[in-house]
């Protein structure tokens, strides 16, 4: 009661701003602030990957290993949001970590890996994602490719903390949950030096915590999912968790469906199949008008014009980007499906579409 | 001054349509260059400015808690006045123009920003960004020309009521924020059309009144009340009132300097029908005047001292106008146009002179002429032999 009166009074004293606008000057990570984090350490992993250790704001609600966090960071002065898997379980120091691989021409990944300094303030959202282990996990197969190892290393490190002194948890800590685990990790990478977390995987393997099957494209050739049953003879007894490029995941899905095996996947970007004619996109509220080609998601077109757009995974799974299409047509970049809205005919509030995986298919207007 | 179309020798008569198109292209190129270069340093500029402004406001308000002591009153009032000016001008006005939207920071965005002003941001954006910046200096279209209550051009018929114009203008300057609020509401026109009961008007009126109530509660109740422990209720109230008046006078003066000095052109309604991009640019070039001065002058005026550049490129970040100005000026020279710039006192004098002159019937008070117009005296860089130099100004009869 007293605090809410105080708050009301503070609001009256600072209108048209809000008290947070002033408190943010002094204490951006305090309880009640918009969720942010401060980079406390940047650890290079390979020549184009780095781990960022972040002290999250007081309201960070924790996470389950395998989940991801959305990070907002200013690159060249522009706020960009991307999703990154958390690469540790909950840590005693309360910090969180993400491991980023710089993709060619990648705006955010390049900045995070090469140009981020200790002390940088980043914006965060609470952890989310269903790529997590069940409580009764027993016989598991992880298939990871490239940077797809990140959510998996988060899970493994949680089960078996890897320290400078070696792997904890397997026999030193008598973890009930870890005792009857039987884990195989098939790790795929272009080459050995490009493998993030290879030393952790090797340490886990050496300690007997996991069975590591490393496959390097330059040594073994591209992995054919048909070979999995040779690499992992008891694959039929295992639940598979896979994270990597769309092509690999699609192949796994077909393979596992045919064999009737359980499979959980996490993907970092949508597999785009179709592009067509673009069109003029009008953002009714902000007044921005953009010429967008048929392969540019509405999300990117709007962001480029300075429109404030909500987004989450940016690849069509989380639905945070859903926005009302008032008029016109858009095309789903994954399937080619067209969604149309006709002012005066369809819902006056607009037809809801995911802006991250829909592109203009002719002129269209959004209520944004 | 007379609308450009009715002048005996128009200052743009020497330009062919091709010239004007080329001029537009060259201005587009200047704009593109800045957009390309916009980046982290610009973002750092606005963030630092906002931080400084908030710290200054907070500091000044803390000092005012003891405003019963005259030095505290003086320091606090001065600090608060500066903070309010920065908030309205270099920050608020420019954020609301969308100059910082490209950063996609929801806290510094034209669609989310609210400012320390009587008029709600949304209303102001409509009348200012959409009307004034589109119809700059077009008689009968740009209400900023005299805010609908003043005689701003010889072509407007004189009426005895205009005799009071200098006085209203001064009162308007003192309470500028409320004048703007009434103007954004189109209060005058609504009264004239007897549309006060219109539900849309009522809705907007409610919004404005609620904003004004919050503003007044803050400045005239909450902060004075916080000062009661030191016995400073009244001094703090006076400090807030003074800071608002100082901010009002200052922003009104800057805006007067931007469009009212003698020599700034006005345009006829029909002249903008089918206007090309180049012609639009040209109108902006001739319809605005700059204030020359120090960096502090530019900062405190919200860079509206670069009114010409602002009108050409209203959505470029204000911190870039200074670097754009010499390039714009070079184009004025190249195309034989008059770049209207002068120090603050001269521009302000010229603007007020015009207010007084037009309050009287035509011809009673001398028009500022080529020979005595402050901008032209000051501006000796203007291209030699440009057609306008030799322009004889026709005498205007009653
Ligand atoms: C749930 C989830 C979890 C993720 N976890 C991680 C993680 O732990 N570590 C990590 O490094 N990334 C992760 N990502 C990917 C990350 O969000 C970004 O997409 C990635 O960093 C590229 O962003 P960018 O701004 O650098 O590239 P952009 O500037 O957006 O794109 C530049 C170019 O790279 C291509 N591109 C975009 N994404 C990828 C990609 N993932 N791989 C290859 N090329 C790409 C684009 O098509 C484009 O051509 C995750 C994504 C999701 C959805
Ligand atoms: S951002 Fe996740 S579905 Fe579009």
Image (cartoon, rainbow, N blue to C red):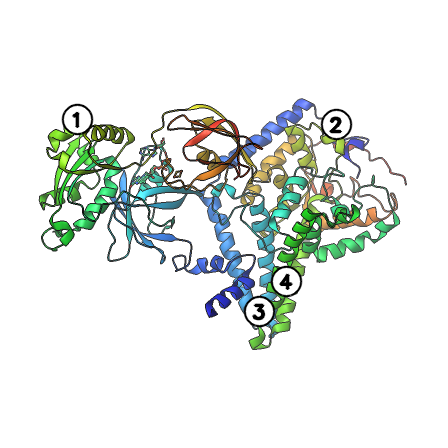
Q: Which mark is residue A355?
A: none
Quadrant location, the C terminus of chain B:
top right
Q: What is the secondary structure assignment of the residue under circle 2?
A: loop
Q: Nearer the viewer, residue A256 or A301?
A: A256
Q: Quote the CA–CA distance across marks 2 and 1.
A: 79 Å
Q: Quote the CA–CA distance across marks 4 and 1.
A: 74 Å
Task: Report in which chain the residue with disc 4 lies.
Answer: B
Task: Report in which chain the residue with disc 3 lies.
Answer: B
Do the residues indicated by labels 4 and 1 lie within the same chain of the protein?
no
Rendered location of residue A130, percent (x, y): 29, 43
Front tag of 4 and 1: 1
Answer with the quarter of the image where residue B271 lies.
top right
Q: Does mark 4 have its CB less than 8 Å from ligand 2?
A: no
Front tag of 4 and 3: 4
| Sequence-wise first label, 4 or 3 | 3
- The residue shown at (81%, 32%) is B6
| Sequence-wise first label, 2 or 3 | 2
Q: Residues within 10 Å of mark 4 (few under 14, many from 20)?
A: some
Front tag of 4 and 2: 4
The residue at which mark 1 appears reads as: A226
The residue at which mark 3 appears reads as: B64
Q: Which mark is residue B216?
A: 4
Front tag of 3 and 1: 1
């Amino acid at each position: 009661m007293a605090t809410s009166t105080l708050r009301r009074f503070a609001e009256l004293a600072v209108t048209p701003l809000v008290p947070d606008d002033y408190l943010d000057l002094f204490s951006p990570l305090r309880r009640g602030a918009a969720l942010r984090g401060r980079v406390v350490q940047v650890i290079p992993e390979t020549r184009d990957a780095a781990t960022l250790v972040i002290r999250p704001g007081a309201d960070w609600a924790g996470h389950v290993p395998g989940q991801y966090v959305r990070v907002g960071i200013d690159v060249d002065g522009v706020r960009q949001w991307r999703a990154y898997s958390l690469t540790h379980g909950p840590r005693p120091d309360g910090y969180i970590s993400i491991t980023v691989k710089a993709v060619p021409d990648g705006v955010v990944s390049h900045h995070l890996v090469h140009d981020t300094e200790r002390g940088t303030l980043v914006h965060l959202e609470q952890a989310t994602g269903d790529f997590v282990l069940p409580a009764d996990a027993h016989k598991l197969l992880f298939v990871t490719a490239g940077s797809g190892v990140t959510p998996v290393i988060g899970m493994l490190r949680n089960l078996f903390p890897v320290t400078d002194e070696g792997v904890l948890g397997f026999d030193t800590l008598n973890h009930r949950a870890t005792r009857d685990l039987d884990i195989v990790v098939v790790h795929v990478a272009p080459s050995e030096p490009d493998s993030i977390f290879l030393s952790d995987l090797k340490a886990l393997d050496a300690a007997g915590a996991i069975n590591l099957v490393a496959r390097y494209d330059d040594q073994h050739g591209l992995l054919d999912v048909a070979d999995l049953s040779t690499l992992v003879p008891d694959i039929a007894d295992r639940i598979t968790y896979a994270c990597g490029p769309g092509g690999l995941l699609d192949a796994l899905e077909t393979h596992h469906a045919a064999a009737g095996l359980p499979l959980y996947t996490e993907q970092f970007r949508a597999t785009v199949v179709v592009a067509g004619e673009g069109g003029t996109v009008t953002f009714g509220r902000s007044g921005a008008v953009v010429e967008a080609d048929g392969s540019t998601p509405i999300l990117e077109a709007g962001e480029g014009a300075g429109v404030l757009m909500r987004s989450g995974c940016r690849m069509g799974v989380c639905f945070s980007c859903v926005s009302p299409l008032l008029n016109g047509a858009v095309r789903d970049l994954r399937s080619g499906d067209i969604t149309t809205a006709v002012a005066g005919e369809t819902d006056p509030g607009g037809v809801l579409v995911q802006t991250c995986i829909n592109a203009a298919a002719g002129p269209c207007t959004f209520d944004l | 001054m007379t609308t450009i179309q009715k002048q005996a020798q128009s200052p743009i008569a020497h330009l062919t349509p091709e010239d004007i198109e080329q001029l537009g292209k060259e201005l587009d190129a200047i704009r593109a260059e800045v957009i390309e270069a916009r980046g982290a340093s610009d973002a750092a500029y606005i963030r630092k400015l906002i931080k400084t402004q908030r710290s200054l406001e907070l500091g000044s308000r803390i000092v005012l808690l003891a405003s019963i002591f005259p030095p505290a009153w003086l320091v606090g009032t001065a600090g608060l006045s500066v903070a309010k000016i920065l908030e309205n001008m270099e920050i608020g006005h420019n954020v609301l123009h969308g100059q910082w939207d490209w950063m996609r920071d929801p806290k510094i965005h034209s669609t989310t920003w609210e400012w320390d002003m009587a008029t709600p941001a949304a209303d102001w954006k409509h009348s200012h960004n959409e009307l004034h910046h589109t119809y700059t200096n077009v008689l009968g279209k740009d209400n900023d020309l005299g805010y609908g209550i003043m005689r701003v051009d010889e072509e407007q018929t004189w009426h005895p009521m205009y005799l009071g114009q200098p006085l209203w203008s001064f009162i308007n300057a003192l309470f500028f924020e409320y004048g703007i609020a009434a103007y954004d509401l189109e209060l005058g026109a609504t009264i004239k059309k007897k549309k006060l009961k219109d539900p849309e008007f009522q809705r907007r009126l409610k919004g404005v009144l609620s904003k004004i109530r919050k503003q007044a509660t803050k400045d005239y109740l909450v902060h004075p009340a916080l000062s009661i422990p030191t016995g400073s209720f009244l001094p703090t109230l006076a400090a807030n009132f003074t800071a608002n008046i100082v901010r009002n006078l200052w922003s009104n003066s800057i805006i007067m300097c931007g469009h009212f000095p003698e020599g700034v052109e006005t345009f006829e309604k029909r002249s903008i029908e089918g206007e090309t991009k180049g012609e639009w640019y040209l109108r902006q070039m001739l319809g605005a005047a700059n204030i020359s001065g120090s960096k502090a002058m530019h900062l405190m005026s919200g860079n509206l001292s670069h009114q010409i550049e602002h009108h050409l490129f209203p959505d470029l970040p204000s911190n870039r106008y200074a670097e754009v100005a010499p390039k714009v000026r070079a184009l004025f020279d190249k195309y034989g146009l008059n770049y209207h710039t002068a120090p603050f006192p001269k521009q302000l004098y010229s603007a007020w002179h015009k207010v007084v002159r037009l309050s009287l019937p035509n011809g009673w008070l001398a028009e500022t002429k080529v020979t005595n117009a402050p901008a032209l005296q000051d501006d000796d860089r203007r291209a030699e032999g440009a057609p306008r130099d030799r322009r004889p100004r026709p005498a205007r009869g009653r």
